[in-house]
Image: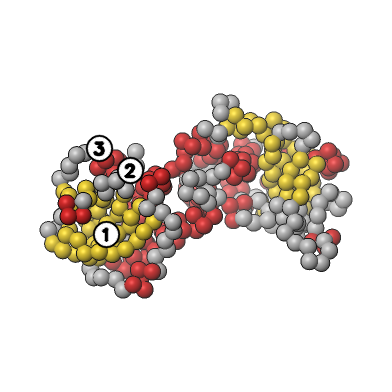
């Protein structure tokens, strides 16, 4: 179990601790003592979590406002008695606000703690806190605290299955560098002049996929563009979860720590975090059919040049039965893309 989560769990279960702040009604535990800061975990009577960090001086409000915040996190400063030094000091407090988001808050504090271990000054500590909070703020701008929706899981599942397919067929681990889906790019995978858009749809006849933007299937500088479609059924028992596919990809990436790091960062960008692991285990996907297409002249799609002036933000669906002459073997797609991944 993660150290932060373990400490908070111990604070929840203990009636008293070695150190307390009775005037604040907090149970506390020293996390790390640095020359320039005491890092303390605290628990309120209502079991809300806090990270309390001593600072050498009170921070001006403008400096404090530079730290990103969001719904569920409150950051403020306060004078408290440091129970580990028995003196009054200024503290910056990172307080959990949403009781339903305990696991997410613990993951945030764990990330802050890991990034602060190597800091050697208050200035570098503040920089790392700001950088870490910005990363999480960007995460929550795009995603819910409660994790990915079923629809979002489904979309990510398809992109991950394509990565898994390529790696299992001995493609270069550089495929990870070519994954742009988490960046919300129009095309999920591209390397040089080759692009692949991945769509994951429910297995219901007639088969169809949804296109989210009017120019999503335009070549736009690509020499070749492909459409990879996974038609799936949801299950609570059979099939694969997001977790299982991710774990297998991590195994396939063994021996390349840099690519593993890039992969994990892209998962975070996509809205996936292990704090929701148990939730993602409850939904499994069974792939019923895989279809690959070459997008070229005549393929049934909309492009910007065909739209009347003033029409924009177009979403549409494509019936796969109308694309049969453009369907190719999955291995042909694999061979084409592998040649461009190093």
Along the viewing direction, whichever of 13 and 237 lies nearer the viewer: 13
Q: Which one is in front in this view, the residue at disc 3 or the one at disc 2?
A: 3
Q: Quadrant of the N terminus?
A: top left
Q: Marks 1 and 2: CB-CB under 8 Å?
A: no
Give the left or right position of residue 104, taking residue 82 as reference: right
Q: Is residue 248 visible?
A: no
Neighbor class of circle 1 (other Cα within 10 Å; few <14, some 14-19, many 20+) is many
Residue 53's label in the rendered image is 1
Give the left or right position of residue 270, taking residue 80 as reference: right
Q: Marks 3 and 2: CB-CB under 8 Å?
A: no
Image point (21%, 64%), residue name: 79
Give the left or right position of residue 135, taking residue 92 as reference: right
Image point (80%, 49%), residue name: 295
- Mark 1 or mark 2: whose residue is earlier in sequence: 2
Of helix, strand and loop, which one carries label 2?
helix
- Mark 3 or mark 2: whose residue is earlier in sequence: 2
What's the CA distance linking mark 1 and mark 2?
A: 18 Å
Where in the figure is residue 69, as x and y percent of width and height? 42, 61
Along the viewing direction, whichever of 110 and 104 lies nearer the viewer: 104
Where in the figure is residue 98, as x and y percent of width and height? 39, 50
Of helix, strand and loop, which one carries label 3?
helix
Q: Is residue 12 visible?
A: yes
- Specify the quadrant of the image occupied by residue 70: bottom left
**To which residue does mark 3 refer?**
13
What's the CA distance linking mark 1 and mark 3?
A: 23 Å
**To which residue does mark 2 refer?**
5
Image point (68%, 53%), residue name: 187
């Amino acid at each position: 179990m993660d150290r932060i989560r373990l400490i908070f769990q111990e604070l929840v279960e203990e009636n008293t601790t070695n150190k307390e702040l009775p005037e604040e009604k907090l149970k506390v535990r020293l996390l790390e003592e640095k020359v320039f800061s005491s890092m303390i975990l605290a628990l309120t009577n209502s079991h809300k979590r806090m990270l309390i960090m001593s600072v050498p001086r009170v921070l001006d409000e403008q400096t404090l406002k530079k730290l990103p915040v969001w719904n569920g996190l409150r950051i403020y400063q306060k004078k408290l008695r440091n129970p580990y030094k028995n003196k009054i000091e200024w503290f910056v407090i990172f307080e959990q606000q949403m009781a339903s988001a305990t696991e997410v808050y613990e993951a945030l504090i764990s990330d802050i703690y890991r990034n602060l271990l190597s800091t050697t000054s208050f200035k570098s500590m503040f920089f790392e806190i700001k950088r870490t909070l910005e990363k999480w703020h960007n995460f929550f701008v795009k995603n819910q605290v409660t994790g990915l929706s079923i629809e979002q899981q489904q979309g990510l599942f398809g992109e991950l299955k394509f990565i898994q397919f390529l790696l299992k067929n001995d493609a270069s681990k550089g495929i990870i560098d070519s994954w742009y889906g988490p960046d919300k790019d129009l095309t999920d995978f591209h390397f040089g002049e080759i692009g692949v858009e991945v769509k994951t749809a429910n297995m219901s006849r007639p088969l169809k996929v949804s296109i989210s933007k009017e120019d999503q299937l335009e070549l736009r500088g690509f020499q070749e563009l492909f459409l990879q479609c996974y038609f799936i059924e949801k299950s609570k028992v059979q099939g694969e979860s997001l977790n299982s596919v991710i774990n297998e990809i991590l195994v396939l990436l063994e021996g390349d720590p840099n690519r593993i790091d890039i992969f994990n960062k892209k998962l975070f960008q996509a809205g996936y975090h292990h704090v929701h692991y148990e939730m993602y285990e409850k939904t499994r996907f069974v792939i019923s059919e895989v279809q690959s297409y070459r997008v070229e002249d005549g393929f049934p799609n909309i492009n910007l040049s065909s739209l009347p002036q003033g029409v924009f933000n177009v979403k549409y669906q494509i019936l796969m039965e109308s694309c049969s002459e453009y369907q190719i073997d999955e291995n042909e797609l694999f061979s084409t893309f592998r040649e461009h991944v190093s």
